[in-house]
Amino acid sequence: MMHERLKDKLRPHRDPPRCALITGATGGIGEAFARELPAMTELVLTGRDEARLAELAAEFGTRARTVVADLATPEGIAAVAEAAEAAECDLLINNAGVGAVGNFLDVDFERHRATLRIDVEAVLALTHRLVPGMIGRAEARGERAGLINVASSTAFVPVPSFATYAAAKAMVLSFTEAFAAEVSGAPIDVLASCPGAVRTAFGARAGYTGTGIPGAMAPEKVARQTLAALGRQSTVMIGPVSAATLAPVALARSMVSHAVMRAGRVMDRVQNRD
């Protein structure tokens, strides 16, 4: 317990973000993030549902700007990135995600392609483009930026009939943990959020025909716990089953990632002396 209190004292102070970009903001976890962020935080909200974005713009008023964009396309990624740069966002929440339920060979390949483009490529593209500017502004202001990549509890295990989605989230998780180690000395907090089942429209869009998933959480819980974990850890498991069964795996992954990074830095120093 004392060790935990000491860690709390050593954690850098996080001010509320000035501006947050949230992808997939038209419902579910993305919309919950927008509502859970402090009222002083400006919002850049993006998604494909133009009507829903208009409703959110009317609700949040001048605090929010919206971008209708398809993150499966380079044009959509560019439009979102330009809006975030113009707003000088210091928190990037890569939340948008799609998937398709069914045996791999039975699902149209374009749906697999869309899963990879939105769930993986867009995450990498927005991170690569926006984070350098976010770090630069944080350094200049003496503040901290933030990056949240929404993965999934499926990132830890292969999931038959949801193979591409689980593999995509495994990539998001692996990338985020490695990237967190790479930028550990910079003024940015990086977090992979791995929720279990959540009560959203995602399942229906993915083709799940059941009446509901037992134990599914409210998206507000996921958003709240994710924001609370930012700056405290690099991976957070949300949901009783995920926390009980996967937390030891996540801890081991994090330890290995940091050990590999430290070994790599030692090798760099040795080579630079030669």
Image: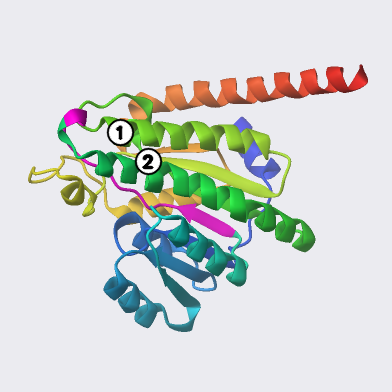
Q: Earlier in the sequence, mark 1 or mark 2?
A: 2
Percent position of residue 189, x then y: 61, 47
Q: Amino acid at mark 1?
A: Thr
Q: Residue at x 51, y 21 (%)?
A: 252
Q: Is there CB contact under 8 Å for labels 1 and 2?
A: yes
Q: Residue at x 27, y 43 (%)?
A: 110
Q: Quadrant of residue 155 in the image?
A: top left
Tag on residue 164? 1
Q: Residue at x 32, y 64 (%)?
A: 48
Residue linked to disc 2: 116
Percent position of residue 273, x then y: 92, 20
Tag on residue 184? none
Q: Amino acid at mark 2?
A: Leu
Decide whether the magenta segment is chiefly helix, strand or loop: loop
Residue interval drawn in magenta = 91-105
Is residue 160 shown above or below 226?
A: above
Percent position of residue 218, x then y: 27, 52
Q: Quadrant of residue 152 in the image?
A: top left
The residues tagged by marks 1 and 2 sit, at their Cα atoms, a distance apart of 8 Å
In the image, 247 versus 161, the foreground residue is: 161
Is residue 64 shown above or below 194?
A: below
Is residue 235 shown above or below 123?
A: above
Q: Secondary structure at mark 1?
A: helix
Mark 2 Cα within 10 Å, few/some/many (few <14, many 20+)? Answer: many
Q: Secondary structure at mark 2?
A: helix
Which quadrant: the N terminus?
Answer: top right
